[in-house]
């Protein structure tokens, strides 16, 4: 005959909970520490058994207890996800991190800094490409979109990062025989005050700043007396200076705009299997045996509130029951309101406790402790040492 109401005892077997999340957990249903049957016995007595009839079956207690554990796990995991999401984004989703320590790293900061490195040309995760166009004597303006992007990148948008259009380095013109007229190199050396020395025959060891001063002098001379090597770049249309006197090749480096503006860039292979947001952070239901006694007490109280809510729903089906010459009222509505208040209180207490143990709160507490300790140590008299 099927069980109608709570008889005062139960014997749990695997498969009697709706989802079976914890059926194989030895702490939940093991022979030595059968928590689920102990909870059913405790909750039945808390609801009035055996003085009063409790219109619940053992399966009802099992379902409420399983839901309470799952709710506790969900609340803690939600907090952990919020606290650790910044450090877990981009990590593989295949590994369950429930009950595991998450150590903050600089990986996220470095990953973001690479975007600045790309723009500054000193690193980053966007590839640089090299390209060139032909420069025609007498023509200063060139459209890189039509001459290069449309041809070499199939019309894709490019962004030029560097243009190699510079004068010959001044260092190469120290002994340039064509830098002056007349005596060539000798005249150049004479101009710098070294006319008594022949560069092909004798040498003088000079300090390094002498070379730097000569380089600066040559560059200043070029910028004042010659046409400076420069360019203007607007909307990938380049105008080069000075006016080309001969046909040559202009080289440049560029990136594809689609690479730089791609928000799905990742430094991990298999980017489809990494943490992207709150929904796929790999926190699963906790293992019941690893939950401490504080958590288990919360679970028991929450499960009792669920049982009270369920019993209230059952008793609310009939507001009163007729008896000889009178009728008796049932307390279904009262049980439901009490259960709702108890559940809300327990959830609020748990969330407040989790917030007080967040990474930020713990760091602030550690800072306060260090400051208080330093203040206390400052009041300790310093010993006087006599040598």
Image (spheres, grey):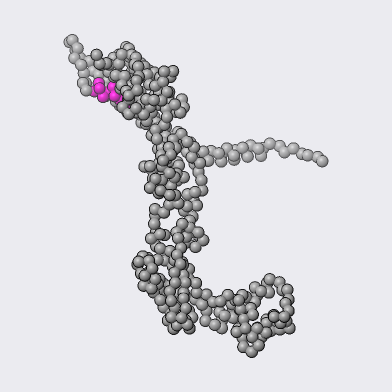
* Residue depicted at x 22% and y 23%: 317
Image quarter hosting the C terminus: top right
The location of residue 105, given as percent across then percent down, is: 51, 45
Instruction: Identify the residue at the far right of this view.
Output: 387
* Residue depicted at x 52% and y 79%: 228
Judge by depth and name the residue closer to the eye, 189 or 80.
Answer: 189
Query: Magenta residues?
Result: 305-316
Q: Is residue 258 left or right of residue 379?
A: left
Looking at the picture, does residue 117 appear above or below residue 170? above
User: Is 259 included in the stretch rendered in magenta?
Assistant: no
The location of residue 148, given as percent across then percent down, is: 39, 71
Q: Is residue 46 visible to us here?
A: no
Instruction: Identify the residue at the far top of this view.
Output: 324
Looking at the picture, does residue 75 appear above or below residue 39? below
The location of residue 303, given as percent across then percent down, is: 36, 25
Judge by depth and name the residue closer to the eye, 98 or 174.
Answer: 174
Looking at the picture, does residue 316 appear above or below residue 92? above
Judge by depth and name the residue closer to the eye, 107 or 92.
Answer: 92
Image quarter hosting the N terminus: top left
Q: Is residue 386 left or right of residue 3?
A: right
* Residue depicted at x 52% and y 81%: 227
Question: Magenta stretch: dominant SS?
Answer: helix
């Amino acid at each position: 005959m099927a069980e109608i109401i709570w008889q005062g005892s139960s014997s749990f077997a695997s498969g009697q909970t709706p989802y079976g999340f914890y059926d194989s957990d030895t702490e939940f249903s093991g022979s030595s520490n059968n928590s689920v049957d102990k909870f059913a016995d405790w909750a039945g007595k808390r609801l009035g058994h055996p003085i009063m009839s409790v219109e619940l079956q053992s399966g009802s207690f099992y379902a409420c207890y399983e839901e309470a554990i799952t709710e506790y796990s969900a609340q803690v995991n939600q907090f952990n996800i919020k606290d650790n999401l910044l450090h877990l984004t981009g990590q593989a989703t295949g590994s369950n991190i429930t009950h595991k320590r998450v150590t903050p790293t600089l990986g996220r900061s470095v990953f973001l800094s690479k975007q600045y490195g790309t723009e500054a040309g000193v690193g980053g995760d966007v590839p640089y490409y090299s390209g060139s166009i032909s420069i025609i004597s007498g023509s200063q303006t060139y459209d890189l979109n039509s001459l290069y992007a449309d041809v070499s990148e199939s019309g894709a948008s490019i962004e030029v990062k560097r243009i190699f259009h510079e004068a010959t380095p001044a260092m190469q013109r120290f002994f340039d025989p064509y830098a002056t007229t007349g005596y060539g190199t000798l005249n150049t050396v004479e101009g710098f005050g070294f006319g008594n020395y022949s560069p092909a025959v004798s040498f003088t060891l000079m300090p390094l700043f002498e070379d730097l001063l000569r380089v600066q002098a040559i560059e200043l001379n070029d910028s004042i007396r010659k046409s400076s090597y420069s360019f203007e770049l607007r909307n990938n249309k380049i105008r080069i200076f000075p006016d080309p006197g001969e046909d040559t090749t202009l080289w440049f480096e560029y990136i594809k705009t689609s690479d730089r503006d791609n928000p799905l860039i990742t430094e991990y292979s298999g980017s489809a299997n990494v943490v992207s947001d709150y929904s796929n952070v790999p926190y699963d239901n906790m293992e019941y045996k690893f939950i401490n006694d504080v958590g288990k007490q919360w679970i028991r109280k929450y499960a009792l509130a669920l049982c009270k809510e369920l019993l209230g729903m059952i008793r609310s089906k009939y507001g009163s029951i007729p008896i000889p010459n009178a009728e008796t009222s049932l307390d279904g509505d009262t049980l439901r309101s009490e259960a709702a208040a108890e559940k809300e209180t327990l959830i609020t207490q748990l969330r407040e406790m989790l917030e007080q143990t967040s990474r930020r709160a713990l760091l602030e507490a550690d800072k306060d402790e260090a400051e208080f300790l330093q203040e206390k140590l400052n009041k300790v008299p310093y010993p006087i040492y006599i040598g």
